[in-house]
Amino acid sequence: MATSRYQNRETAINADDLYKNLLKKRGLHFFEQYRTARLAYPSEEEISRMTLVPHLWVMGNRFYKLANTYYSDPSYWWVIAWFNKLPTEHLVSVGQIIHIPTNLEEILDYLDI
């Protein structure tokens, strides 16, 4: 089972007036939400020590499919997206080369996950 990317994430209490009607309808006074994560990106030197597989993006590719192929777990799709600085698939063009870091444990350790 994959480690959740929400593990060790800070949360915040949101009781903003903007949500007043929604909270009232649901019988709530506030709701808790995750703060935006700040993920460090490896330096060129760190990247040079990693094992990367170049992948030619073709029609039908999806990050979750690549994560399933390389990590045997589609829930790690975000690692490929993060590493390539492409938060969504619509930012990848057919014919573009992306890089898959193959040592998942190393990447998760780097991210302290």
Image (spheres, helix red, strand yellow):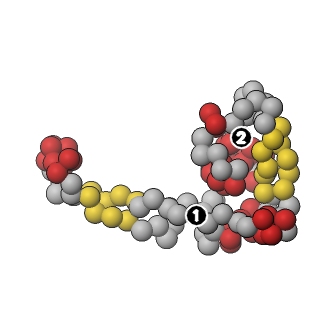
Q: CA distance from mark 2 to mark 1?
A: 23 Å
Q: Nearer the viewer, mark 2 or mark 1?
A: 1
Please, what is the three-letter code of the amino acid marked with disc 2? Lys
Q: Which mark is residue 39?
A: 1
Say which residue label 2 marks.
Answer: 65
Q: Nearer the viewer, residue 64 or 49?
A: 49
Q: Position of residue 40 (x, y in %)?
A: 61, 66
Element under disc 2:
helix
- Total number of numbered labels? 2
Quarter-wise, where is residue 30 in the image?
bottom left
Q: Which mark is residue 54?
A: none
Q: Position of residue 48 (x, y in %)?
A: 84, 65
Q: Position of residue 75 (x, y in %)?
A: 62, 50
In which quadrant will I find the C terminus? bottom right
Res. 21 in view:
yes
Is residue 42 toward the left or the right of residue 102 in the image? left
Residue at image position (78%, 69%) is 46
Q: Nearer the viewer, residue 31 or 81?
A: 81
Please, what is the three-letter code of the amino acid marked with disc 1? Leu
Residue at image position (41%, 61%) is 35
Residue at image position (74%, 62%) is 104
Element under disc 1:
loop
Q: Residue furthest top?
A: 59
Is residue 31 toward the left or the right of residue 29 in the image? right
* Mark 2 residue crowding within 10 angstroms, few (<14) / some (14–19) / many (20+): some
Residue at image position (75%, 51%) is 72
Q: Residue furthest front?
A: 44
Image height of 44 relative to 59, above or below: below
Q: Nearer the viewer, residue 72 or 63?
A: 63
Res. 105 in view:
no
Q: Position of residue 57 (x, y in %)?
A: 78, 35
In which quadrant will I find the N terminus? bottom right
